[in-house]
Amino acid sequence: MSTMFRFTSLLIYASVVVAGLDSQPVDSSSLGSRVATAWYAGWHVTDHPLSAVSWSKYTILNYAFALTTPDPSVISVVDSDQILLPQFVAAAHKHNVQASLSIGGWTGSRWFSANVGSAPNRTAFVKSVAALVKKYKLDGIDFDWEYPGIQGIGCNLVNSSDTANFLLFLQELRTTVGSKLTISAATDVTPFVDSSGAQSADVSEFGKVLDYIIMMNYDIKSTPATGAGPNAPLDDSCAPVGSQHGSATSGVSAWTKAGMPSNQIVLGVPAYGRSYRVAESAAFSNGASPPLASYPTYDLSNKPSGDRWNGEGGLDVCGVYQDPGGTYAFRNLVDAGFLNTDGSVQSGISYRYDNCSETPFVYDPKTNILVTFDNVQSFAAKGSYIKSAGLKGFAVWEAAGDLNNLLVNAILNGTVNGTSRTIKESPQPSSTTSSSSSAAHIYPWNSLHTLSTTLEVLMLFSLFCRSIPF
Ligand SMILES: *[C@@H]1O[C@H](CO)[C@@H](O)[C@H](O)[C@H]1NC(C)=O
Ligand SMILES: *[C@@H]1O[C@H](CO)[C@@H](O)[C@H](O)[C@H]1NC(C)=O
Ligand SMILES: *[C@@H]1O[C@H](CO)[C@@H](O)[C@H](O)[C@H]1NC(C)=O
Ligand SMILES: *[C@@H]1O[C@H](CO)[C@@H](O)[C@H](O)[C@H]1NC(C)=O
Ligand SMILES: *[C@@H]1O[C@H](CO)[C@@H](O)[C@H](O)[C@H]1NC(C)=O
């Protein structure tokens, strides 16, 4: 059997190398009016200092995160971020890249609802945002409210008027700050909900005040009942009916039907994967030999903890214990024994590229860990889709996750040079990622045992996750 693995790996190695980009410089200047962005997670500064950022690959970068507070006149920038954020802005400007600040995130969205909940609160919140822009010389603000009208981490304030209030707030903000500030909103793959909790029929007014939305097409749900599926499917119309939980194509279709112009949709793409414990008998379609099966059943009681960035679990901001998140940054798949530094697959690892979701899967029979992730091939496909569908660009969660620019080069090349794809009608997602919330939130924690500096301890407060139950 190990010969089999080696043989498969060899084939994969060959195909990845042929399809792969090397780390030759590719810059973002050929993008025209498109956006090439990523979030820069301040708490990963030690592993990914500002000097390591590939500025030439991006038109704008989002610093993550400033946090909402109960008081709309106060937006929290924790001490370590107060030091790093000005350095981030200066470095971005030195490289002719716009600097944006992302407010909210998985752990920082608790108070948005109250901050936009009344006219005086909106005015106060607008003033706070404008003050941050001035203080830190920002070119943009990214609202990462997870999610208006829908519970996220578990202890967010939620109000059925959230979406309407968010729009009123954004309108007032736009009037106040003018057209120069780039204003974006990171969203789910389904449109903001209306006051009844259903997807809004018309979000076109958001398009008038936002420069663009960033549709976060990742952390797409898997359930033990339907098996381990892709983290970030490009398409899911070809997936088993019970596993159509959203994709780039269904999300773009839903948002554009609701009136968001496609050229104001930036596709959120993950430089990480999600892991599952899968028995060998389930992992392979033919008993114990390759190829890997699609949607294998997995063991929810024995979840892998993921890479070292996940830490060991702990209490979230709601005071609820969360397991390590089980994510693997693309670059950490090397140390974890799955990939080589050129993105090819290590020997002993089985690989499958799912031609429906257009995402890769790797499986280690020694540990029974399956990772569903994104690589050069899937980022190239996503780039071609962005070009074909006329989207505004891409946004990578997160800049630190890439490996020798393999992913960003691939998506840049796809966005600029990609071959055109047929854009099909997609089914509507069977549920949003968030409305499926259960007690099983997975939460990636910074590794407590690797914390070495006060700076990092402080950064623990800006911990973030977009993840949803698995
Ligand atoms: C407005 O903000 C205050 C805190 O300053 C909060 O107590 C109140 O609930 C908010 N109003 C709404 C309608 O959310
Ligand atoms: C929900 O929002 C409405 C409209 O802004 C507001 O009148 C109401 O006080 C809010 N409810 C709560 C519980 O904050
Ligand atoms: C994927 O590949 C299989 C086998 O080659 C083929 O039958 C199927 O139609 C393909 N699906 C898509 C969505 O391309
Ligand atoms: C697009 O293709 C041209 C020609 O091969 C290449 O020089 C350029 O770097 C590519 N653009 C991107 C963004 O990769
Ligand atoms: C860039 O994309 C084009 C079109 O998909 C492809 O033919 C080419 O091989 C890609 N370039 C690299 C360096 O991968």
Image: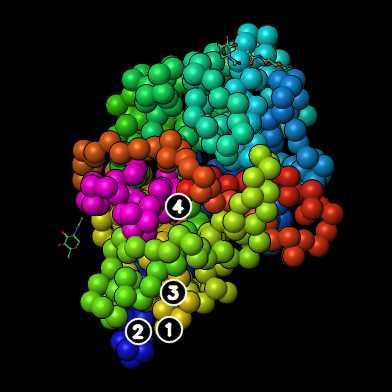
Q: Quadrant of residue 323?
A: bottom right
- Give the residues drawn in magenta, as a range: 217-246
Q: Which residue corresponds to the image point at 48% horizontal and 77% vertical from the top-left?
A: 367
Q: Residues within 10 Å of mark 1 (few under 14, many from 20)?
A: many
Q: Quadrant of residue 452?
A: bottom right
Numbered mark located on residue 470 in the image: 4
> Label 3 to label 1, Cα distance in Å?
15 Å
Number of labels in the image equals 4
Numbered mark located on residue 5 in the image: 2
Q: Does 101 appear in magenta?
A: no
> Label 2 to label 3, Cα distance in Å?
14 Å
Q: Tell me which numbered mark, 1 or 2, is placed earlier along the sequence.
A: 2
Mark 1 = which residue? 347
Q: Which amino acid type is marked by label 4?
A: Phe
> Label 4 to label 2, Cα distance in Å?
28 Å
Mark 3 = which residue? 368
Q: Residues within 10 Å of mark 4 (few under 14, many from 20)?
A: many
Q: In front of the other: label 4 or label 2?
A: 4
Q: Residues within 10 Å of mark 3 (few under 14, many from 20)?
A: some
Helix or strand or loop: what does disc 2 sit on?
Answer: helix
Q: Tell me which numbered mark, 4 or 2, is placed earlier along the sequence.
A: 2
Q: Is 57 left, or right, of 89 in this rendering?
A: left
Q: Tell me residue 51's x, y (percent).
A: 70, 57
Evaluate if marks 4 and 1 touch, with contact meaning CB atoms under 8 Å apart. no
Q: Which residue corresponds to the image point at 30% horizontal and 42% vertical from the top-left?
A: 249
Q: Which residue corresponds to the image point at 33% horizontal and 71% vertical from the top-left?
A: 283
Helix or strand or loop: what does disc 4 sit on?
Answer: loop
Identity of the residue furthest to the top in this view? 119
Q: Which amino acid type is marked by label 3?
A: Asn
Evaluate if marks 1 and 2 touch, with contact meaning CB atoms under 8 Å apart. yes
Q: In front of the other: label 3 or label 1?
A: 3
Image quarter of the N terminus: bottom left
